[in-house]
Image (spheres, rainbow, N blue to C red):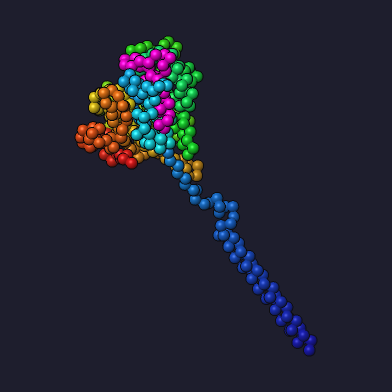
């Protein structure tokens, strides 16, 4: 009897040990599953940090036009009862200037105003209303460094700058004082893309720059330009240079132009806008020493002037795009997709001046209009065969 009770007690004890052992295994198994599930649920801080950064791309457009060269025939035609009105001359090209994020013009003549006395070639002074018309048409920036900057001296420059400031127009290449010269021109867009504008000229028609007042006009000087470009690159996403260079009335750039463009490309400039030849010179991409690509138009020709030979009546709107892609802490800025709109200055008997997109011209406005238009398109795309032309 005692032996039977002892055996039952031993069996009962073994059963309890087995139950405790099984319960422990089950609970540990459940705990391990929960830990495993937690490590793959995507709900922990560590897993969120491993997610792929979102890529965001912003884009803006830039439009540029050539010489606003205001001869007496042009400002006489703009005369109205109270002052001058150049807006009708730009009405048909306004849509192509106002739709860009930023538009820049080469203001070849100082707008010193009537109080100083208007004048034409060879020493220009233009009505301030030229600036008003450019603002109305959609221009945001004007380049002032050219061979006519000093035509009527410092007074014309100071008067012109006062008006540019009055209408809130950014200007570059000619300044009111040293402090103004040292203030880098950077256009900050709503899209978060910043663009720096620099401007230089080969000379001033033999008129000496006043001693101690080199701020009145930026001359082409490689050391100065290299410093300015480096400074601009540190503070802006894109650097655009206006260069007043080349030989007048030559339709292809000379070697000095090509060499200078190569130099600024090597410094990291993103875009070069050429002026001075008064005729169109082609568009190209130039590779800098660091493998960067610089977009250049060697000459944008006359946009509005009183010159009367055919190729001197041809200008255009040069348009390109800038994209900025951000991903994580990295950014990539790219200049791309150049376009061009050839334009023609139509007038009759030195009156009724009007800038017209060439694709809109009729044979009454320009005999063989389509043939001329095709020839200009071929010329501008000499080195960029896939260049797009705006026709909308």
Could you tell me if residue 280 is visible in this image?
Answer: no
Magenta span includes 136: yes
Residue plotted at (47% across, 20% down): 162
Q: Which residue lies furthest to the top in this view?
A: 211
Query: What residue span does the magenta drawing correspond to?
Result: 109-138
- Compared with residue 74, is residue 17 higher up or lower down, i.e. above or below? below
Q: Residue 82 location, x and y as percent?
A: 42, 21
Magenta span includes 116: yes
Nearer the observer, 299 or 289 = 299
Nearer the observer, 54 or 273 = 273
Q: Residue 329 location, x and y as percent?
A: 50, 42
Tell me the chief SS of the magenta region.
loop
Q: Residue 308 location, x and y as percent?
A: 25, 23
Quadrant showing the C terminus: top left
Quadrant showing the N terminus: bottom right
Q: Residue 373 location, x and y as percent?
A: 24, 35
- Compared with residue 333, is residue 174 higher up or lower down, i.e. above or below? above
Left or right side of 371 for 190 = right
Left or right side of 126 for 312 = left
Residue plotted at (40% across, 27% down): 133
Q: Which residue lies furthest to the front in this view?
A: 81
Residue 129: which quarter of the image? Answer: top left
């Amino acid at each position: 009897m005692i032996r039977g009770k002892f055996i039952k007690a031993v069996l009962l004890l073994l059963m309890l040990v087995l139950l405790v052992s099984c319960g422990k295994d089950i609970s540990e198994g459940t705990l391990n599953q929960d830990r495993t599930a937690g490590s793959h649920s995507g709900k922990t801080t560590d897993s969120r940090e491993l997610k792929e950064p979102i890529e965001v791309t912003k884009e803006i457009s830039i439009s540029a036009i050539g010489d606003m060269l205001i001869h007496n025939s042009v400002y006489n035609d703009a005369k109205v009862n109270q002052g001058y009105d150049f807006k009708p001359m730009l009405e048909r090209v306004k849509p192509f200037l106002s739709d860009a994020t930023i538009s820049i013009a080469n203001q070849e003549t100082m707008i010193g105003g009537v109080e100083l006395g208007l004048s034409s070639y060879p020493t220009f002074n233009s009505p301030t209303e030229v600036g008003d018309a450019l603002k109305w048409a959609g221009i945001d920036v004007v380049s002032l460094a050219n061979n006519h900057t000093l035509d009527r001296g410092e007074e014309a420059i100071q008067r012109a700058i006062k008006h540019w400031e009055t209408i809130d127009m950014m200007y570059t290449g000619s300044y009111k004082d040293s402090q103004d010269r040292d203030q880098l021109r950077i256009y900050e867009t709503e899209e978060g893309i910043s663009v720096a504008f620099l401007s230089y000229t080969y000379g001033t028609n033999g008129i000496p720059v006043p001693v101690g007042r080199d701020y009145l006009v930026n001359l082409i000087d490689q050391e100065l330009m290299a410093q300015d470009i480096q400074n601009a690159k540190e503070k802006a996403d894109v650097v655009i240079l206006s260069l007043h260079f080349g030989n007048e009335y030559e339709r292809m750039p000379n070697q000095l132009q090509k060499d200078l463009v190569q130099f600024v490309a090597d410094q990291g400039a993103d875009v070069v806008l050429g002026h001075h030849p008064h005729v169109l010179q082609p568009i190209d991409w130039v590779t800098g020493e660091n493998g960067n690509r610089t977009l250049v138009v060697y000459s944008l020709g006359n946009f509005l002037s009183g010159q009367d030979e055919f190729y001197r009546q041809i200008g255009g709107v040069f348009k390109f795009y800038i994209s900025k892609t951000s991903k994580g802490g990295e950014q990539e800025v790219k200049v791309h997709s150049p376009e061009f709109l050839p334009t023609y200055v139509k007038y009759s008997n030195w009156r009724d001046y009007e800038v017209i997109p060439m694709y809109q011209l009729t044979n009454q406005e320009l005999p063989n209009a389509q043939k001329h238009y095709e020839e200009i398109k071929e010329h501008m795309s000499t080195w960029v065969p896939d260049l797009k032309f705006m026709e909308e």
